[in-house]
Amino acid sequence: MMQERSAGIVLFREDSGKKLFLLLHYPSGHWDFVKGRIEKGEQEKEAAIREAREETGITDVEFIDGFEEKIHYTYQYDGKQVKKEVIFFLGKTKTSNVTISDEHLDHVWLEYDLAYSKTTYQNAKSLLQKSKALVFAS
């Protein structure tokens, strides 16, 4: 079985006292957070920042201490099973304008309850739940 490691960010910003979370619409149809493969020689947070820049154009990510969550899943690629680990960090940005890459169909900034409803997979919902206390304390 092939193995793959990625890094991502549960990214949020403040707007008029509201906390808004960024979700990306992936071509497979699901809504999820910024994430991508860790390149050779890259640290996990470096990969997460690079992926945020490449996928959204956002460059001003401030990591929130106390949040580092790993998720695991498997998927099929080219007839082979891939075991994937993704490490997620929590990040805050002041940037509201998003320029999505050609890897995505759309994006949306949503308040917590709407973001929770819109995320497709349970592991993304769990990440959002785990981030809640830190986001609303900041």
Image: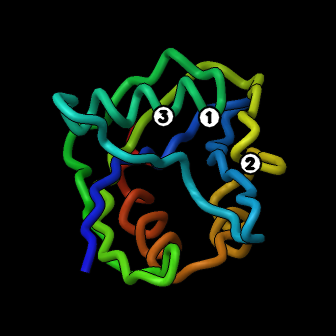
Tell me what residue is drawn at x 62 percent, y 32 percent.
14
Tell me what residue is drawn at x 42 percent, y 36 percent.
91
| Secondary structure of the residue carrying numbered label 3 | helix
Q: Quadrant of the N terminus?
A: bottom left
| Mark 2 in CB contact with mark 3 (< 8 angstroms) | no
Q: Nearer the viewer, residue 16 or 97?
A: 97
| Secondary structure of the residue carrying numbered label 2 | loop
Give the residue pinned by disc 2.
104
| Mark 1 in CB contact with mark 3 (< 8 angstroms) | yes
Q: Quadrant of the C terminus?
A: top left
* Residue 87, quarter of picture: bottom left
Tell me what residue is drawn at x 75 percent, y 57 percent.
25
Give the mark nearest the N terminus, 2 or 3.
3
* Residue 119, quarter of picture: bottom right
| Secondary structure of the residue carrying numbered label 1 | helix
Left or right? Give the position of 9 relative to 63.
right
**Tag 3: residue type?**
Glu
Other residues around mark 3 within 10 Å, as few (<14) / some (14–19) / many (≥20) = many
- Seen as rendered, the residue at the extreme top is 60
| Cα–Cα gap, marks 2 and 3 | 12 Å
**Tag 1: residue type?**
Glu
Query: Which labelled disc corresponds to residue 51?
Result: 3
- Seen as rendered, the residue at the extreme front is 79
Q: Position of residue 121 (x, y in %)?
A: 57, 79
Other residues around mark 1 within 10 Å, as few (<14) / some (14–19) / many (≥20) = many
Q: Position of residue 137 (x, y in %)?
A: 38, 44
Tell me what residue is drawn at x 82 percent, y 50 percent.
105
